[in-house]
Amino acid sequence: DVKVTQSSRYLVKRTGEKVFLECVQDMDHENMFWYRQDPGLGLRLIYFSYDVKMKEKGDIPEGYSVSREKKERFSLILESASTNQTSMYLCANSRGHRSYNEQFFGPGTRLTVL
Amino acid sequence: QKEVEQDPGPLSVPEGAIVSLNCTYSNSAFQYFMWYRQYSRKGPELLMYTYSSGNKEDGRFTAQVDKSSKYISLFIRDSQPSDSATYLCAMRHGSSNTGKLIFGQGTTLQVKP
């Protein structure tokens, strides 16, 4: 059974803390993505990576950074958490083929910043 | 203006009804059109995808793309309570090799027994 796992389902942090969200996939897929999901705004892409040590900004990268040291692991870092980063964070991955459309999502991490 | 627009609902229908979910988009470069289904407290899962214009049917689900109107639809026939979920449309450029998708806001559907 293929899996995408995220380090926590629920997380509560304080303003100014450094936050690490981890995503691990066992699908051997090249592309990995971090999204945030907010009511009325849908899924918004924060960062993505199409190869180890490669990263590209998505639509809302401000306040976030990422790390991909190994193919199966993609980390999202909030350098100094703020209340407007309270959200559901979803990790996804897909095969590195131009015509492949399916992204496989993890269960999400609901982050609350107080 | 967002590249992809989707009415968030919620949409509530009785069991057995035909459901129509829709998205509009502004970028004519989109070639691949997808529908994802997201159950509560889960990540989205791909339901169907269509390349360019036309219809695609899979069981009770039919996806339609009208590129001339920049409008896509998902029809659910004989809707069931198990269809209650949030449905997200997604699109991407034909030339993209990174798999980057643009998602709509999602429509929440409730099918009442």
Image (cartoon, rainbow, N blue to C red):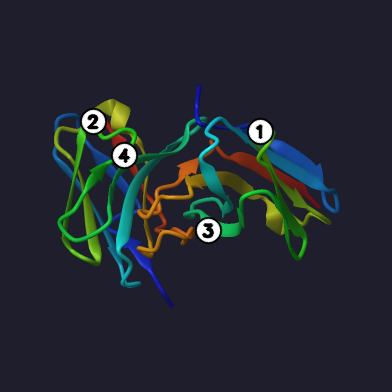
- On the same chain: label 4 and label 3? no
Q: Nearer the viewer, mark 1 or mark 2?
A: 2
Which of these two is toward me, A46 or B32? B32
Gap in angstroms between the C-alphas marked 4 and 2: 10 Å
Q: Which mark identifies residue A62?
A: 2
How many residues crowd mark 2 within 10 Å: few (<14), some (14–19), many (20+)? few
Tell me if A72 is positioned left or right of B58 in this view: left
How many residues crowd mark 4 within 10 Å: few (<14), some (14–19), many (20+)? some
Q: Earlier in the sequence, mark 3 or mark 1?
A: 1
Q: Which mark identifies residue B9?
A: 1
Q: Nearer the viewer, mark 3 or mark 1?
A: 3
Q: Amino acid at mark 1?
A: Gly
Gap in angstroms between the C-alphas marked 4 and 1: 27 Å
Mark 1 secondary-structure assignment: loop
Give yes or no for contact between labels 3 and 1 (Cβ–Cβ under 8 Å).
no
Mark 4 secondary-structure assignment: loop
